[in-house]
Amino acid sequence: MCLLSGVILSFTGLLFQTILNNMLADSYSLGLASGASLGAGLGVVLGVSYIAIALLSISMSILSLVLILLLASIFRNRQVALILFGMFLNMFFASVLYVLLLLNPNKQQQMLNYLFGSLSSVDLMDVILVGCVTLIGIIIIGYHYHSLSLMRLGELTSKSLGMSYTKLMYLLLLVASIMTAVLISVTGIIGFVGLVIPAMMKHVKGRFYDQTILTVLFGMLVLVLGDFIGKNIVYPIEIPVSIMMSIIGCPMLFYLLIRELKYTR
């Protein structure tokens, strides 16, 4: 599951950043992860099946995506608006989930997994579910991969080349949202992987295909490393992988932001 999580988070992070043309865009910063986590938490409270929890998670993630895109479209500076509204949704959904946790003390352990992403409670059925959704998502995205690489040129250029830009954008965003929502319904929120890794790999020279492969491989490596350190650094206490990703990811993100500001002066 650790490898699968690395693939999904890094790959969908690359999708969000490419489509929205924003290096700070990913499922976490846009509020989709918190929405999916709240949906999964509602499923736990209602006592529904794993499949129903995944469906609730997907529904809330898609709702978050629609809200973000609608709100951001009102403002001239769309890139800034996406992140600001994403932060707002993150705080709101996390607060609602925390209230649910307080109202349901008998289900605190399950719900805490969605606040602090962890791989410790994953079983074989979870791996199969996430693996199947990931495979379907990669097939759909792979079919449109050439068009996705053209989207880096911008909306106007893509449309001038005959691409149905808007339809493809919504399709790919929907697929990426579903992939991350299903993962979150199993592991909870794991931040920074989808934000930092794709932004780092954009500085690697080469084709978009090469950057994609490097993004996925590096995402898998970082998540495996974070999970390993979290399990062994203060053994027998296990630090959730989401906390390790925050510890590793914050300095990396800080470096990327400083570098970006330096070159845009």
Image: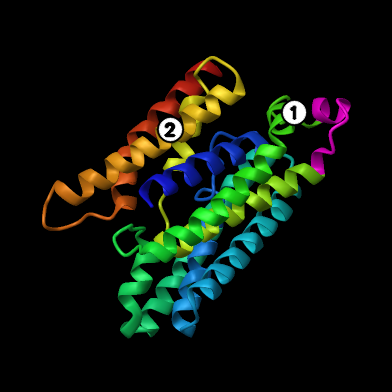
- Give the residues in magenta: 156-166
**Which residue does the image show at 72% across and 29% down from the upper left?**
146
Q: Position of residue 32 (x, y in %)?
A: 56, 56
What quarter of the picture does the C terminus occupy?
top right
Residue 241 pos. (x, y %): 31, 51
Counting other residues with Cα less than 10 Å from the Cα at mark 1, is it few (<14), some (14-19), or many (20 or more)?
A: some
* C-alpha distance separating marks 2 and 1: 26 Å
Q: Which residue is mark 1?
A: 154
Q: Amino acid at mark 2?
A: Leu
Q: Is residue 261 left or right of residue 141?
A: left
* Magenta stretch contains residue 137: no
Name above or below for residue 186 compared with residue 77: below
Q: Which residue is mark 2?
A: 217
Residue 110 — which label? none
Identify the residue shown where x is 40% and y is 72%. Answer: 98
Q: Is residue 85 visible?
A: no
Q: What percent of the width, then of the height, locates residue 12?
A: 56, 43
At label 1, the amino acid type is: Gly
Left-right relation of 59 to 181:
right
Q: Residue at x 43, y 49 (%)?
A: 5
